[in-house]
Image (cartoon, grey):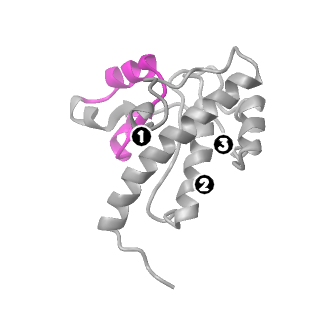
Amino acid sequence: MGGICRPPSAVGVLRHLVQEAGLQDHIKIDCAATHDYHIGEPPDGRAQFVSRKHGYDISDIRTRLITLEDIKEFDLILAMSWETLSFLQQMAPRKEYHKLMLLMRYANDYEEATVPDPYYGGVDAFFKMLDYLEDACQGMFEVISKRVTQYQPLSSS
């Protein structure tokens, strides 16, 4: 909701997967908040710490609000919680609903429907959050990368 914990951490994981696969020219990744609590701020220090421990640098990300243009532009809008998904559904035109879903639907190792918000917890809550995000992002990346490589042949060197 505030955009300083879960969204930038997910971006860190996804950027890593996309760069590893050489698909950065084909897949655009961004994150945005649904509420203006932290606009312009970097990710929470605990999120940055845990991300760095896992090899992801998210220090360049700054929180911004999601816009209607984002919903129209992006092919997929992933929510971390039921509340965020509901907010997005209220914001989006009906013809864009198919793009809105919970990120955890792509998880393979965790059964939870949502990514727990670590904001009011200690650093352990952030490690748990990142475990969920790595699982769900990996599952989503497997689906997305297949679609991208089917329709956008990769150049070979």
Which span of residues is magenta-colored? 67-93
Q: Which residue is mark 2?
A: 16
Nearer the observer: mark 2 or 1; the answer is 2
Which one is nearer the viewer's eye here, 59 or 128?
A: 128
- The residue to which callout 3 is attached is 61
Q: Which residue is mark 1?
A: 70
Q: Amino acid at mark 3?
A: Ile
Q: 4 or 150, which lies in front?
A: 150
User: Dot 3 surroundings within 10 Å: few (below 14), some, or many (20 or more)?
Assistant: many
- Above or below, 35 against 99 in this view is above
Q: Of marks 1 and 3, which one's residue comes earlier in the chain?
A: 3
Tell whether 28 sits left or right of 8.
left
Q: Secondary structure at mark 3?
A: loop
Q: Which residue does the image show at 76% across and 29% down from the upper left?
A: 46
Identify residue type, mark 2.
Answer: His
Q: Earlier in the sequence, mark 2 or mark 1?
A: 2
Q: Up-down: is 87 above or below 22?
A: above
